[in-house]
Structure formats: structure tokens, C-alpha cells
Image: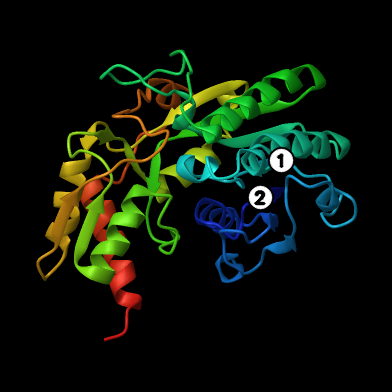
């Protein structure tokens, strides 16, 4: 049994990861400021503490100083579009939180630090699977702050930190925040479909993304604990490969028993036309292979949402 600190435990990925660690018999301490997550998402058995990972108060008496076996830093502002609203907040929520948490880990003798990175660091890339050594030219404040966090991780290797950063592509699945209409392409489209029978896509249907199901993401994070090859690495975590936005919309509308209309109009600041992952490094270092196809993952998410809906 080990003791893990998981930030963002009231959010989509953090809650799923904490639940998996608890199922394996580990102890989990969680932290979240509930800005986008919900207290009811925190898995039972988690020792939960309310606080902002980017603020010093969390580390001065709120979060317990314990001998953690590893820190999973999942919390943060996770929308490229929203990062344009308040870039200073985005900096604090992402880069500053990583720096503060790294110092907290070191002060408590914890040298294993696993980070939720983002494909947003890449910016515009050719229409080929993007590798981790591709030039990083982020187009949003969010992407810049995520890239800065990775640089902080690398800088802290000299102090003994053994880090892994998983650059997550478009994560989706049950438990995603369906009320946030500015983050999460699948959740936004599915929410529109269920609420209005209509999907408004900001951008063209030939744009493309790499969609990865939440269970595959959790498997990647937990694999970092047992695969020493992952230490000191930055790795892509993708799932579907190259999938166009138009194809995603078609898969979603096919799930509905009633007709769903789709409109393509407008755009999103900091958005790229397309990006998808080369996952060769994650396969080599983590034994990572996505197990849930887009069709299966979307069907699971739809079934979970409609099962909770009133008759």
C-alpha cells in the first residue's frame, strides 16, 4: 500500500485516477479548489482538502505534510479558449501551481512527480503523427503555461525529482463536466445533442483531433508507478489517432434515437486545424496501447449520461 497525493480530485481526470488508486488499495490525499470540479466527484475514501494549488495557503497548514510516495498533479485551468479571458489566472492555475507543488513534494521527501501535460504545447504541426521532439509553439496562454510546467519539472531533476509528463490529447468519457461549454470537444457536442438536438461546431468539419478515453488515460498514469523507464520522460497519450471533427459529429449523431442537426460556424481563439499523436514512446516506456475505440468510448459515455437522465 502506498500514499499518493492527487490534485484535481473533484475534476474529471483526477477523480477517475483517485478512484483507480483507491481500488488498488492505496491511500489517496486529494486537493481541489472546486472552480470547475464538484465535491460529489471526489471518490469515497479520499482524504480531501479544499484549496488552490496555485496559492501558498494550501501548503501552509491545509494540505498535510506527509511522506507521499508520489504526487499526481492533475489540477489546473484546462481550456485554451478560457485562458484568453484571464492569462494571469491561467499562469497561476497551471505553471505556478506546478512550481509550488514541486517544492511541497521536495519538502516532504517525495521525489516522484507525475504531471498531466497537454498536446496544446505543440501548436501548429504537419498532418503527420506528432512526436514529443516536435517544435513546441503553443497558440494559447494555456499551452504556454503547460509548457512552462514541463520546464519546471526538468529543472527540478537536479534536486532529485523523478518526473513524468503525459501530454494528453482530447480526453473524454463518463464523468466529464457537461456544463462547461468551453472545454472538451466531445462533452460539448454531446451536451448540445442531448439538450437541444443540435450540435454547433466552431470550425470546419475537416479539422482533426486525437480522442482518448478516460480509462486509457488512467491506465497510462498508473503505469508510470511501475515502469521506471517513464522517469524523466515527456510522452504523448493519444487514443483514436487522426479523427476528423466531422466524423466525430457523425458518430455522435448516430447514437441518438432522434434526428440531430449539425452546424459548422465560427471559430475558437488559439485553436489549431489538426493534431494527433505518435504514441510510440508511451508504448515503449509504459507498455501503453489504447484499449477503447472511439465508437465504444462514445457509446459508453452516451449510455452513462442517458441512464442518469429522467425518463
Give the label on residue 97, or none.
1
| 129 to the left or right of 229 | left
Q: Secondary structure at mark 2?
A: strand
The residue lying toward the viewer, choosing from 85 and 51, is: 85
Q: Residue furthest left?
A: 259
Give the label on residue 300, or none.
none
Q: x%, y% of residue 65? A: 87, 49
| 75 to the left or right of 168 | right
Crowding at label 1, few (<14), some or many (≥20) Cα neighbours within 10 Å?
many
| Nearest to N terminus: mark 1 or mark 2 | 2
**Up-down: is 97 above or below 179?**
above
C-alpha span from label 1 to label 2:
10 Å
Q: Are marks 1 and 2 in contact (CB under 8 Å)?
A: yes
Quarter holding the C terminus is: bottom left
Residue in view at x 38 percent, y 25 percent: 279
Q: x%, y% of residue 234? A: 54, 23
The residue lying toward the viewer, choosing from 102 and 197, is: 197
Q: Which residue is mark 2?
A: 7
Please say whether residue 127 is visible from this viewpoint. Answer: yes
**Up-down: is 5 above or below 255?**
above
Amino acid at each position: 500500500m502506498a500514499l499518493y497525493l492527487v490534485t484535481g480530485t473533484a475534476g474529471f481526470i483526477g477523480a477517475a485516477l483517485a478512484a483507480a488508486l483507491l481500488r488498488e488499495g492505496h491511500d489517496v490525499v486529494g486537493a481541489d479548489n472546486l472552480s470547475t470540479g464538484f465535491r460529489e466527484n471526489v471518490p469515497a475514501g479520499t482524504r480531501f482538502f479544499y484549496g488552490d494549488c496555485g496559492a501558498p495557503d494550501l501548503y501552509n497548514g491545509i494540505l498535510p505534510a506527509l511522506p507521499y510516495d508520489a504526487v499526481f498533479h492533475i489540477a489546473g485551468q484546462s481550456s485554451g479558449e478560457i485562458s484568453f479571458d484571464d492569462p494571469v489566472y491561467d499562469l497561476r492555475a497551471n505553471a505556478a501551481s506546478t512550481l509550488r507543488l514541486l517544492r511541497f513534494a521536495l519538502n516532504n521527501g517525495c521525489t516522484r512527480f507525475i504531471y498531466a501535460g497537454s498536446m496544446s504545447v505543440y501548436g501548429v504541426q504537419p498532418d503527420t503523427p506528432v512526436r514529443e521532439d516536435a517544435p513546441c509553439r503553443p497558440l494559447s496562454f494555456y499551452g504556454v503555461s503547460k509548457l512552462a510546467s514541463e520546464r519546471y519539472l526538468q529543472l527540478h531533476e537536479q534536486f532529485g525529482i523523478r518526473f513524468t509528463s503525459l501530454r494528453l490529447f482530447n480526453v473524454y468519457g463518463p464523468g466529464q463536466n457537461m456544463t462547461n461549454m468551453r472545454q472538451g470537444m466531445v462533452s460539448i457536442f454531446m451536451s448540445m445533442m442531448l439538450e437541444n438536438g443540435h450540435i454547433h461546431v466552431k470550425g470546419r468539419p475537416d479539422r482533426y483531433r486525437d480522442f482518448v478515453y478516460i480509462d486509457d488515460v488512467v491506465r497510462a498514469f498508473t503505469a508510470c508507478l511501475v515502469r521506471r523507464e517513464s522517469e524523466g520522460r515527456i510522452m504523448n497519450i493519444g487514443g483514436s489517432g487522426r479523427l476528423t471533427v466531422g466524423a466525430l459529429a457523425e458518430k455522435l449523431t448516430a447514437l441518438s434515437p432522434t434526428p440531430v442537426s449539425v452546424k459548422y460556424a465560427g471559430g475558437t481563439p488559439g485553436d489549431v486545424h489538426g493534431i494527433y499523436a505518435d504514441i510510440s514512446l508511451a508504448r515503449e516506456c509504459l507498455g501503453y496501447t489504447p484499449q477503447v475505440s472511439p465508437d465504444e468510448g462514445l457509446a459508453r459515455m452516451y449510455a452513462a449520461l442517458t441512464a442518469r437522465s429522467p425518463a
